[in-house]
Image: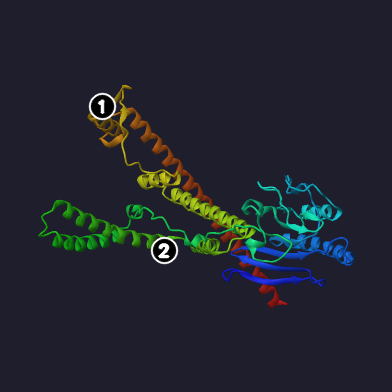
């Protein structure tokens, strides 16, 4: 009997009628369950039992390549305390019986070849007798599982005639196996991401800020209307804060749209492919190989996207490399280097004498440092005039070199144009001369 919640199908039935295989599927795990009966050695069907043993070995080896294997039944053999070996791991066996026969050795060898472990006696409890016959008690019923299932398998339980309610000279055996649960990545609760409004701060277009100011005016009118009769300061501040966030949210959405419009077609296509691969990776019933292939493709796409973005940043830096666009050049350089704006001044700072300052003195030290960077006029008496003059001379020298390069390029281009014109004139004269000769002839 199989639970209705599990998907199962009939796989194989031996021509000897004493061997049957079914496949049980749960999420992405396949388990092949086999039931077998081997006649005892004194039986007249002993040849049939030998052939069935060979068939069992082939079936176990084949099904182990497709999934996990469970084999149970009356094997009518004695394995005593023979060890099981699977995946270079040795499973010692404890048993109430030390008896070993030829069929028992052969069954253990076949199971070891396919990394299948006979569970009787390899767990905490010793293997118990499963058969009561006039000749005495013995262990004839066995349960074997794939090596990967051993850790997920409970102790073997034994039920006698009273507990099972079956009239038989054999004891019923069984165990519980924990099926592997694969949690779908799609069902995981998404963590709420912290919203950032950096997209709004990076906008340079005056049209964008003109539009945002209109939105802000309308929104603030609504806010003032709401807090008009409100007496609680905290409530007023909450309404005002929510109004500011709403305006920034609108600006963030429009800023993202502008950013997408500015991206190249190639980058947009690669981003779409990346999102498609991410969805496929999340929703797929992930087999390990498929998971690795998708992961590698995602990493390659991310590298390509990073290269394209870096190339665009470099081009942007090169484009504004001039004295007139110095601030924009500096902003692009910071973005290229991955610079992030800090939101907190350090608690202590060193002043120009090398002494550590804190509190108000710390702010004064920062103020003095920034003033010396060039905020004040060059005509100030305490301004480093020599350094500023050297910088000015260097800028003039670089500008002159650039102008000379431009002039030399223009001269070369004019020379090439003149040569091309001379060549065209010579070609025209040759054609006219050839035409006259043809007319004379």
Residue, disc 2: 261
- Judge by depth and name the residue closer to the eye, 245 or 99: 99
Percent position of residue 58, x then y: 80, 62
Percent position of residue 172, x then y: 68, 61
Mark 2 residue element: helix
| Relative to 230, 4 lies left or right | right
Percent position of residue 353, x then y: 31, 21
Marks 1 and 2, how far apart at CA: 49 Å
Q: Residue 382 has which mark?
A: 1
Kindly give the residue lying farthest to the front in the view shown: 134
Question: Sequence order check: which comes first, mark 1 or mark 2?
Answer: 2
Of circles 1 and 2, the one toward us is: 2
Residue 267 in sight: no
Where residue 417 sits, quadrant-wise, is bottom right
- Judge by depth and name the residue closer to the eye, 95 or 27: 95
Where residue 136 sits, quadrant-wise, is bottom right
- Judge by depth and name the residue closer to the eye, 389 or 212: 212
Count neighbours of disc 2 (C-alpha within 10 A) and say few if under 14, some if 14 to 19, many if 20 or more: few
Quadrant of the drawing holding the N terminus: bottom right
Q: Which residue appears at 31% of the width and 59% of the height?
A: 249
Residue 192 in sight: yes
């Amino acid at each position: 009997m199989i639970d209705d919640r599990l998907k199962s199908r009939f796989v194989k039935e031996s021509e000897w009628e004493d061997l049957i295989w079914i496949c049980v599927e749960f999420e992405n795990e396949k388990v092949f369950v086999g039931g077998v009966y081997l006649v005892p050695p004194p039986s007249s069907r002993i040849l049939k039992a030998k052939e069935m043993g060979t068939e069992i070995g082939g079936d176990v080896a084949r099904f182990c390549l497709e999934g996990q294997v469970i084999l149970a039944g009356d094997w009518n053999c004695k394995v005593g305390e023979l060890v099981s070996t699977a995946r270079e791991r040795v499973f010692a066996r404890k048993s109430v019986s030390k008896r070993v026969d030829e069929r028992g050795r052969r069954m253990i060898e076949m199971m070891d070849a396919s990394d299948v472990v006979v569970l009787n006696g390899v767990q905490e409890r010793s293997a118990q007798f499963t058969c009561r016959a006039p000749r005495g008690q013995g262990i004839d019923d066995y349960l074997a599982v794939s090596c990967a299932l051993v850790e997920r398998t409970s102790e073997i339980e034994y039920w006698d005639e009273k507990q099972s309610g079956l009239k038989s000279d054999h004891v019923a055996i069984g165990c519980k196996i924990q099926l592997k649960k694969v949690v779908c990545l799609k069902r995981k609760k998404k963590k709420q991401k912290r919203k950032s409004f950096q997209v709004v701060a990076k906008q340079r277009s005056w049209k964008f800020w003109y539009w945002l100011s209109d939105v802000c005016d309308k929104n603030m009118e609504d806010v003032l209307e709401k807090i008009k009769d409100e007496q609680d300061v905290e409530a007023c501040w909450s309404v005002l804060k929510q109004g500011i966030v709403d305006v920034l949210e609108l600006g963030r959405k429009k800023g993202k749209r502008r950013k997408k419009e500015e991206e190249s077609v190639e980058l947009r296509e690669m981003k779409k492919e990346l999102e498609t691969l991410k969805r496929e990776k999340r929703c797929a019933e992930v087999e390990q190989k498929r998971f690795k292939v998708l992961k590698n493709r995602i990493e390659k796409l991310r590298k390509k996207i990073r290269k394209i973005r870096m190339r665009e940043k470099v081009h942007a830096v090169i484009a504004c490399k001039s004295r007139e666009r110095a601030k924009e050049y500096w902003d692009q350089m910071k973005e290229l280097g991955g610079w992030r704006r800090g939101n907190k001044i350090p608690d202590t700072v060193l002043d120009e004498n090398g002494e550590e300052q804190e509190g108000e003195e710390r702010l004064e030290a920062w103020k003095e440092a920034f003033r010396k960077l060039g905020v004040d006029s060059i005509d100030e008496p305490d301004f480093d005039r020599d350094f500023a003059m050297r910088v000015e001379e260097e800028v003039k020298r670089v500008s002159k070199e650039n102008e000379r390069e431009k002039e030399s390029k223009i001269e070369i281009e004019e020379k090439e144009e003149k040569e091309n014109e001379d060549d065209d004139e010579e070609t025209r004269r040759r054609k006219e001369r050839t035409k006259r000769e043809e007319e004379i002839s």
